[in-house]
Image: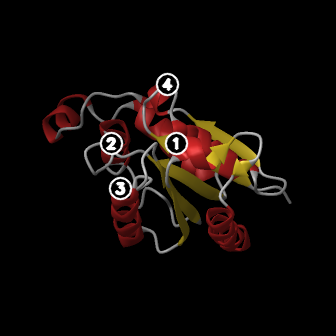
Amino acid sequence: MNKTILAFGASNSKHSINKQFAKFVAEQIPGAIVDLLDLNDFEMPIYSIDREKATGVPDLARQFLEHIEEADGIVISFAEHNWTYTVAYKNIYDWTSRIQRNVWMDKPMYILSTSPGGRGGKTVHEEALASIRRRNKNVVAGFSLPSFRKNFSEEHGILDAALATDFNRQLQTFIEAL
Protein backbone atom coordinates (compact mmCIF):
# COMPACT_ATOMS: atom_id res chain seq x y z
CA MET A 1 0.00 0.00 0.00
CA ASN A 2 1.32 3.45 -0.92
CA LYS A 3 2.08 5.90 1.87
CA THR A 4 1.48 9.63 1.67
CA ILE A 5 4.53 11.60 2.73
CA LEU A 6 4.12 15.25 3.62
CA ALA A 7 7.37 17.05 2.79
CA PHE A 8 8.48 20.65 3.06
CA GLY A 9 11.44 22.88 3.59
CA ALA A 10 10.96 25.01 6.71
CA SER A 11 11.81 28.12 4.73
CA ASN A 12 9.98 30.68 2.63
CA SER A 13 12.81 31.08 0.12
CA LYS A 14 11.55 30.62 -3.43
CA HIS A 15 14.77 28.70 -4.18
CA SER A 16 14.96 26.81 -0.90
CA ILE A 17 17.61 24.11 -0.79
CA ASN A 18 15.72 22.70 2.21
CA LYS A 19 12.55 22.28 0.14
CA GLN A 20 14.67 20.62 -2.57
CA PHE A 21 16.23 18.31 0.02
CA ALA A 22 12.89 17.41 1.64
CA LYS A 23 11.45 16.57 -1.79
CA PHE A 24 14.43 14.37 -2.62
CA VAL A 25 14.12 12.50 0.67
CA ALA A 26 10.38 11.91 0.33
CA GLU A 27 10.92 10.59 -3.20
CA GLN A 28 13.36 7.96 -1.86
CA ILE A 29 10.51 6.16 -0.12
CA PRO A 30 9.32 3.31 -2.34
CA GLY A 31 5.79 3.87 -3.64
CA ALA A 32 5.40 7.16 -1.77
CA ILE A 33 2.78 9.68 -2.76
CA VAL A 34 4.60 12.95 -2.04
CA ASP A 35 2.62 15.95 -0.81
CA LEU A 36 5.22 18.72 -1.24
CA LEU A 37 4.27 21.98 0.44
CA ASP A 38 5.63 25.47 -0.06
CA LEU A 39 5.41 27.56 3.12
CA ASN A 40 4.70 30.62 0.97
CA ASP A 41 1.25 29.12 0.35
CA PHE A 42 0.54 29.36 4.10
CA GLU A 43 1.61 32.93 4.82
CA MET A 44 -0.44 34.35 7.68
CA PRO A 45 -0.26 37.41 9.92
CA ILE A 46 2.31 37.13 12.69
CA TYR A 47 0.72 35.21 15.53
CA SER A 48 -0.42 37.07 18.61
CA ILE A 49 -3.03 36.27 21.20
CA ASP A 50 -4.64 39.67 20.53
CA ARG A 51 -4.96 38.92 16.81
CA GLU A 52 -6.36 35.45 17.57
CA LYS A 53 -9.00 36.94 19.89
CA ALA A 54 -9.90 39.62 17.34
CA THR A 55 -10.05 37.58 14.15
CA GLY A 56 -9.71 33.91 15.08
CA VAL A 57 -7.31 31.39 13.61
CA PRO A 58 -6.72 31.81 9.85
CA ASP A 59 -8.13 29.16 7.52
CA LEU A 60 -4.61 28.60 6.19
CA ALA A 61 -3.64 27.12 9.57
CA ARG A 62 -6.52 24.64 9.26
CA GLN A 63 -5.47 23.80 5.72
CA PHE A 64 -1.91 23.14 6.85
CA LEU A 65 -3.20 20.76 9.54
CA GLU A 66 -5.31 18.94 6.93
CA HIS A 67 -2.11 18.08 5.06
CA ILE A 68 -0.63 16.67 8.26
CA GLU A 69 -3.77 14.70 9.02
CA GLU A 70 -3.79 13.13 5.55
CA ALA A 71 -0.11 12.12 5.72
CA ASP A 72 1.30 8.78 6.84
CA GLY A 73 4.69 10.34 7.54
CA ILE A 74 6.35 13.76 7.57
CA VAL A 75 9.69 14.93 6.19
CA ILE A 76 10.85 18.42 7.17
CA SER A 77 14.16 20.01 6.24
CA PHE A 78 14.94 23.02 8.41
CA ALA A 79 16.64 26.16 7.19
CA GLU A 80 18.63 28.01 9.82
CA HIS A 81 18.21 31.76 10.34
CA ASN A 82 20.38 33.19 13.10
CA TRP A 83 20.82 29.74 14.69
CA THR A 84 17.11 28.98 14.89
CA TYR A 85 13.91 28.39 12.86
CA THR A 86 12.79 30.67 10.08
CA VAL A 87 9.99 33.05 10.98
CA ALA A 88 7.86 31.48 8.22
CA TYR A 89 7.99 28.04 9.87
CA LYS A 90 7.59 29.31 13.43
CA ASN A 91 4.56 31.43 12.55
CA ILE A 92 2.77 28.52 10.85
CA TYR A 93 3.58 26.30 13.81
CA ASP A 94 2.31 28.93 16.28
CA TRP A 95 -1.02 29.29 14.47
CA THR A 96 -1.60 25.56 13.94
CA SER A 97 -0.77 24.76 17.55
CA ARG A 98 -3.73 26.92 18.57
CA ILE A 99 -6.01 24.43 16.80
CA GLN A 100 -4.17 21.18 17.53
CA ARG A 101 -1.71 21.10 20.42
CA ASN A 102 -0.04 18.00 18.99
CA VAL A 103 0.55 19.57 15.58
CA TRP A 104 2.38 16.54 14.19
CA MET A 105 -0.33 14.11 15.36
CA ASP A 106 2.25 11.49 16.36
CA LYS A 107 3.10 10.77 12.73
CA PRO A 108 6.51 9.24 11.97
CA MET A 109 8.91 12.06 11.17
CA TYR A 110 12.28 12.42 9.47
CA ILE A 111 13.85 15.71 10.59
CA LEU A 112 16.49 17.15 8.28
CA SER A 113 18.52 20.28 7.82
CA THR A 114 20.97 21.55 5.26
CA SER A 115 22.79 24.75 4.43
CA PRO A 116 25.47 25.98 2.08
CA GLY A 117 27.92 25.98 5.01
CA GLY A 118 29.90 23.25 6.68
CA ARG A 119 27.59 22.85 9.69
CA GLY A 120 24.52 22.02 7.58
CA GLY A 121 22.09 23.90 9.81
CA LYS A 122 23.21 21.75 12.74
CA THR A 123 22.04 24.24 15.40
CA VAL A 124 18.47 24.46 14.11
CA HIS A 125 18.49 20.70 13.48
CA GLU A 126 19.26 19.97 17.12
CA GLU A 127 16.70 22.54 18.25
CA ALA A 128 14.03 21.10 15.94
CA LEU A 129 14.67 17.54 17.11
CA ALA A 130 14.43 18.54 20.77
CA SER A 131 11.35 20.70 20.30
CA ILE A 132 9.37 18.31 18.12
CA ARG A 133 10.21 15.32 20.33
CA ARG A 134 8.55 17.10 23.27
CA ARG A 135 5.20 16.75 21.48
CA ASN A 136 5.71 13.85 19.09
CA LYS A 137 7.43 10.73 20.38
CA ASN A 138 7.42 9.38 16.83
CA VAL A 139 10.40 11.37 15.52
CA VAL A 140 12.26 8.36 14.20
CA ALA A 141 15.07 9.80 12.12
CA GLY A 142 17.27 12.84 11.80
CA PHE A 143 20.02 13.92 9.42
CA SER A 144 21.95 17.11 8.75
CA LEU A 145 23.67 17.61 5.39
CA PRO A 146 26.59 20.07 5.43
CA SER A 147 27.76 22.04 2.38
CA PHE A 148 24.65 21.35 0.30
CA ARG A 149 26.03 22.38 -3.08
CA LYS A 150 29.18 20.31 -2.58
CA ASN A 151 27.47 17.21 -1.14
CA PHE A 152 24.20 17.02 -3.08
CA SER A 153 23.11 16.55 -6.66
CA GLU A 154 19.48 16.31 -7.81
CA GLU A 155 20.54 13.57 -10.18
CA HIS A 156 22.66 11.49 -7.78
CA GLY A 157 21.51 12.53 -4.31
CA ILE A 158 24.06 12.67 -1.51
CA LEU A 159 27.53 12.54 -3.04
CA ASP A 160 29.77 11.98 0.00
CA ALA A 161 29.91 8.23 0.73
CA ALA A 162 30.03 8.52 4.54
CA LEU A 163 27.17 11.02 4.61
CA ALA A 164 25.15 8.86 2.20
CA THR A 165 25.62 5.82 4.45
CA ASP A 166 24.39 7.72 7.52
CA PHE A 167 21.49 9.22 5.55
CA ASN A 168 20.39 5.84 4.18
CA ARG A 169 20.50 4.26 7.63
CA GLN A 170 18.22 7.00 8.95
CA LEU A 171 15.97 6.75 5.88
CA GLN A 172 15.55 3.01 6.42
CA THR A 173 14.53 3.66 10.04
CA PHE A 174 11.90 6.14 8.82
CA ILE A 175 10.59 3.73 6.15
CA GLU A 176 10.25 0.96 8.74
CA ALA A 177 8.27 3.30 11.03
CA LEU A 178 5.75 4.03 8.28
Q: Residues within 10 Å of mark 4 (few under 14, many from 20)?
A: few
Q: Amino acid at mark 4?
A: Lys
Nearer the observer, disc 3 or disc 2? Answer: 3
Viewer-proximal residue, 8 or 3?
Answer: 8
Q: Earlier in the sequence, mark 3 or mark 2?
A: 2
Determine the secondary structure under disc 2. Answer: helix
The circle drawn on residue 152 is none
- Residue 95 position, x and y percent, is 32, 42
Q: Which residue lies at the image location 49% right of the left edge and 26% below the top edge?
A: 41
Q: Which residue lies at the image location 61% right of the left edge and 64% below the top edge?
A: 163
Q: Amino acid at mark 2?
A: Trp
Nearer the observer, disc 2 or disc 1? Answer: 1
Determine the secondary structure under disc 4. Answer: loop
Residue that mark 3 sits on: 124
Q: Residues within 10 Å of mark 3 (few under 14, many from 20)?
A: many
The circle drawn on residue 18 is 1
In the figure, is residue 52 to the left or right of 42?
left
**Gap between marks 4 and 2, in whole Å?**
22 Å
- Residue 113 position, x and y percent, is 48, 53
Residue that mark 4 sits on: 14
Q: Earlier in the sequence, mark 2 or mark 1?
A: 1
The circle drawn on residue 95 is 2
Q: Which residue lies at the image location 27% right of the left edge and 51% below the top edge?
A: 83
